[in-house]
Image (cartoon, rainbow, N blue to C red):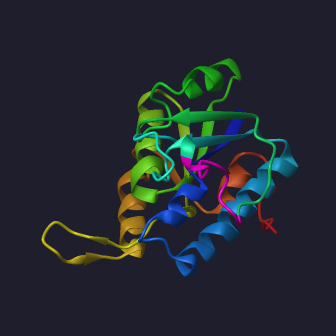
């Protein structure tokens, strides 16, 4: 089955948010970059998705006018097979990504990017409902601590665990980087990604 890596919203816009943490992002970059490099080495197409929204002013980090809707510093450089802009949580809503994937004969999506429980999870659910097989690479997604409606803290690690639990076996196969690369044919069984 032909696979495609989707790198969702890995854009400099997020560094402008108050919740950004370089410390938290370090392990994400290591996993995301290993996934990118493994797919690139195996000739698996890599698609870049950017999130753009209003207001269209330079002070809004998700507006094109800000200059921040670009690959996030620290992300491995790669030649995108295609680049899409989205305006909703799912990368498949009115972006043209679904059409491109169908035209390319892609049967399996490898989902990665920012944020774990938001655009990555939403895209995964949507893709599954549309018939794609999805490998969700939790370690190659990034999120941050949040506050629950009742004021209690919710740790990023708990958000990632919850997302993996609700997706696995229903909307996706939750994978490590190595497992996703192996399933896509980029690694032989038992090989460890660099």
Q: x%, y% of residue 75?
A: 71, 61
The answer to whether 34 appears left or right of 143 in the picture is: right
Task: Check the image and name the residue furthest to the left.
Answer: 150
Q: Residue at x 67, y 53 (%)?
A: 71
Quadrant of res 151: bottom left
Main SS category, magenta section: loop
Start-end of magenta stretch: 66-74
Q: x%, y% of residue 174?
A: 52, 56
Frontmost residue, 61 versus 36:
61
Q: Residue at x 82, y 69 (%)?
A: 194
Q: Is residue 67 magenta?
A: yes
- As displayed, is residue 142 above or below residue 57? below
Task: Check the image and name the residue furthest to the bottom.
Answer: 23
Q: Residue at x 35, y 64 (%)?
A: 162
Frontmost residue, 42 versus 28:
28
Q: Residue at x 39, y 59 (%)?
A: 163
Q: Is residue 91 visible?
A: yes
Q: Is residue 142 visible?
A: no
The answer to whether 173 appears left or right of 19 in the picture is: right
Tally of numbered discs = 0
Q: x%, y% of residue 24?
A: 53, 77
Quarter holding the N terminus? top right
Quadrant of res 106: top right
The answer to whether 38 appears left or right of 121 in the picture is: right
Frontmost residue, 49 versus 185:
49
Q: x%, y% of residue 77?
A: 79, 55
Q: Is residue 91 magenta?
A: no
Frontmost residue, 75 versus 52:
52
């Amino acid at each position: 089955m032909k696979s495609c890596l989707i790198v969702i919203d890995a854009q400099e816009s997020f560094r402008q948010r108050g919740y950004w943490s370089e410390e938290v992002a370090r392990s994400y970059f290591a996993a995301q970059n290993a996934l990118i490099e493994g797919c690139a080495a195996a000739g698996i197409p890599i698609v870049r998705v950017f999130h753009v929204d209003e207001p269209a002013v330079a002070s809004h980090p998700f507006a094109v006018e800000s200059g921040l809707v670009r690959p996030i510093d620290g992300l491995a450089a790669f030649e995108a097979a295609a680049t899409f802009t989205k305006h909703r949580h799912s990368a498949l809503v009115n972006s043209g990504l679904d059409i491109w994937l169908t035209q390319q004969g892609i049967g399996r999506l490898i989902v990665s990017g920012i944020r774990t429980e938001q655009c990555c999870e939403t895209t995964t659910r949507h893709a599954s409902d549309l018939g794609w097989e999805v490998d969700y690479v939790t370690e190659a997604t990034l999120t941050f601590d949040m506050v629950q409606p009742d004021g209690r803290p919710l740790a990023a690690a708990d958000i990632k665990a919850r997302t993996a639990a609700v997706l696995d076996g229903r909307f996706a196969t939750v994978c490590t980087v190595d497992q996703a690369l192996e399933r896509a044919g980029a690694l032989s069984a038992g090989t460890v990604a660099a």
